[in-house]
Amino acid sequence: MLEDKDFGLFITKIKEKTAIDLSQYKEAQMKRRLTTLRQKYGFDTFAAYWSGLEKDKKLMTEFLDRMTINVSEFWRNPSRWDAMEKKFLPEALKNNSRVKIWSAACSTGEEPYTISMILSELGAYDRTSILATDLDNVVLQKAMQGLYQDRSVRDVPRNYMSKYFVKQGEDMLAVTPQLKKNISFKQQNLLHDTFDTGFDIIVCRNVMIYFTEEAKHLLYHKFSKALKPGGILFVGSTEQIFSPAQYNLESIETFFYRRKA
């Protein structure tokens, strides 16, 4: 009981300091992750850990990095990206002179660069803009670098590999500079910040599973309002939206939802 109170006060302090509301994340997962982190540095309680975070900027940076979920790769779930390439992006390009896309919780950048490659192949690079956001500024810096290990690119089609990656050393690859030109990277708190609007496509994958049902409900409403009528929301393979109509969305294909007019 005392430990629960200790963690509750820690959540309050973090929200006051960073505007990050840990209560919106599934408690068991978050508490387990942060308990491991505080014990790593010898803090017996969350109160002691909070004091350490206030005094040590490196500790705070590591805390923010551990709290966010930074797992990403190019073309994750290739069949879904095939639908994006052959159906939903061409549809958006046909219906709009310019296409506005948002990669939400973009982590280290694999997702927005995947979108950028597909747009280049479709000959639509100059007609599009991609906003790529994440809570963690450390991973955003890595995303802007565009430097990846071999394992991150295992699902990239062969013709894309030769055109959009350059070998860096023995086991690293860099995306070509042209892919960065229409991507804007920005730090953002999905649960706290207001969203831009008028998006044709929003991609938010493998993030919602870490949030409470209340937080998911809030975010689906916010994503729907950020889309244009007819705009597409693309979610992760474990994030099916039940009763999408309550968010003014309709399911049009597995893991793809369209905003109703």
Image (cartoon, rainbow, N blue to C red):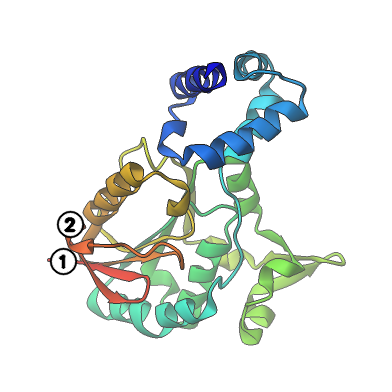
Return the residue at label 2: 246
Q: Residue at x 59, y 69 (%)?
A: 74
Q: Nearer the viewer, mark 1 or mark 2?
A: 2
| Three-letter code for the amino acid on which mark 2 is drawn | Gln
* Residue 119, position as x, y percentages in the image: 45, 75
* Residue 218, position as x, y percentages in the image: 28, 44
Q: Residues under labels 1 and 2: Cα distance?
A: 11 Å
Q: Residue at x 15, y 66 (%)?
A: 260
* Residue 140, position as x, y percentages in the image: 58, 47
| Three-letter code for the amino acid on which mark 1 is drawn | Lys
Closer to the chain start, of discs 1 and 2, is 2
Which mark is on residue 206? none
Q: Can you say whether 183 is above or below 215 in the image?
A: below
Which mark is on residue 260? 1
- The answer, for residue 136, to whether it is visible in the render is no
Q: Residue at x 34, y 43 (%)?
A: 215
